[in-house]
Image (cartoon, rainbow, N blue to C red):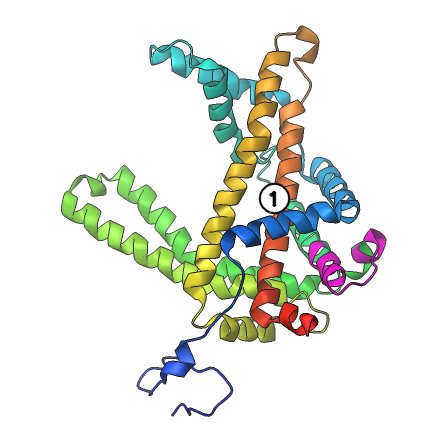
Amino acid sequence: MARKTSKKISMHKTFRRSYREDYKRELEVPGMMAHIFKTFKTIFKNWKLFLPLLILSVLMGVVFVGLMSEDTYQQFQTILDQTTEEMGSGDIGVMGKAGLLLISTITTGGLSGNSSEAAVVFATLIFLMIWLVTIFLLRHIMADKKVKFRDALYNSMSPLVSSLVVFIVAVLQCIPIFILIIAFSTAVQTDFLSMPFYALVFFIFAALMILLSGYLLSSSLMAFVAVSAPGLYPFKALRTAAELMQGRRIRFILRLVSLILALAVTWVIVMLPLIMFDLFMKQFEWTSQIPFVPVCLLIMTCFTGIYITAYLYIYYRWMLGYDKKEEK
């Protein structure tokens, strides 16, 4: 039976008594907007460290994964023009066209869309490199220690295998979502959702699958941060993160929602003017084969990886109370 005096958090075990102080866990952290702007401020304040990481990750993405060709981007434009003509509107304006182009190309991230196994492996390794190097840099920056990008690049890769193990666990925790995608595809093909009752049943099933994966992934994301510490084994990191997240998952999910909204606004603010500029420049024949937008998309994708890592690492530090300890 769970004890009231136990230091280890043990919450809501089946057929076991739980105490209110076990699941009511206070967490004094800055607000969501403060979190968003602190992450931007940290990255831009230390741009001399993060700019080489951004350049290196973009180059690795171009070399090992591939860049979306300009012909593919032109096909997006052609399809968009044909669709608007068929709808009878004829012209949706430069702003509307740029917005639709941004939505249609954002899923590629500026990459070639190559689905080969080698491309997927290289993309995963590039993401892990961005993750580990960013955390290494932030750990030293927030400890007021001098650090060079070269040191971060060479010394941050030691937890690579442990991070891969946590990454595989996170993929396995996404199985309910994969099942949901397969079930939705089957339901659409068989007209299963045409009946209101069946559509309601499927909606409940979808909600349960998403909640299950969200519950599991919330602690895995924190474990992904924790395992970057040298010498910490992956399954110990998963257990530690699960204990850290108990009673705090709802607040963490709200932080993730604010992260998604902040990134969406950032992408619109940065990429929309660039796509409009590209549409204007494409009027000149000599610019027709310059992959301006794919390169910008790839740069924004790599920056997004850096920002997400910094955002989660800062929240992880707040949860552990590191900033309060340093203030004392």
Let me know if residue 119 appears in the view. Answer: no
Q: Is residue 284 left or right of residue 5?
A: right
Q: Can residue 146 be found in the magenta stretch?
A: yes
Let me know if residue 266 appears in the view. Answer: yes
Q: Quadrant of the N terminus?
A: bottom left
Query: Quarter-wise, where is residue 313 in the image?
Result: bottom right
Q: Can residue 74 be found in the magenta stretch?
A: no
Q: Residue at x 24, y 40 (%)?
A: 190
Identify residue for label 1.
Answer: 304
Q: Nearer the viewer, residue 205 or 32?
A: 32
User: Which amino acid, mark 1?
Assistant: Thr
Q: Residue at x 42, y 59 (%)?
A: 214
Q: Quadrant of the C terminus?
A: bottom right
* Vertical comparison of 262 with 207: above or below: above
Q: In the image, residue 19 lies at what x, y percent?
A: 36, 85
Q: Nearer the viewer, residue 143 or 241?
A: 143
Q: In the image, residue 92 lies at what x, y percent?
A: 42, 14
Magenta residues, as a range?
134-152
Q: In the image, residue 94 lies at what x, y percent?
A: 50, 15
Q: Residue at x 57, y 61 (%)?
A: 315
* Vertical comparison of 13 with 137: above or below: below
Which SS does the magenta portion mostly show? helix
Q: Is residue 184 left or right of residue 322?
A: left
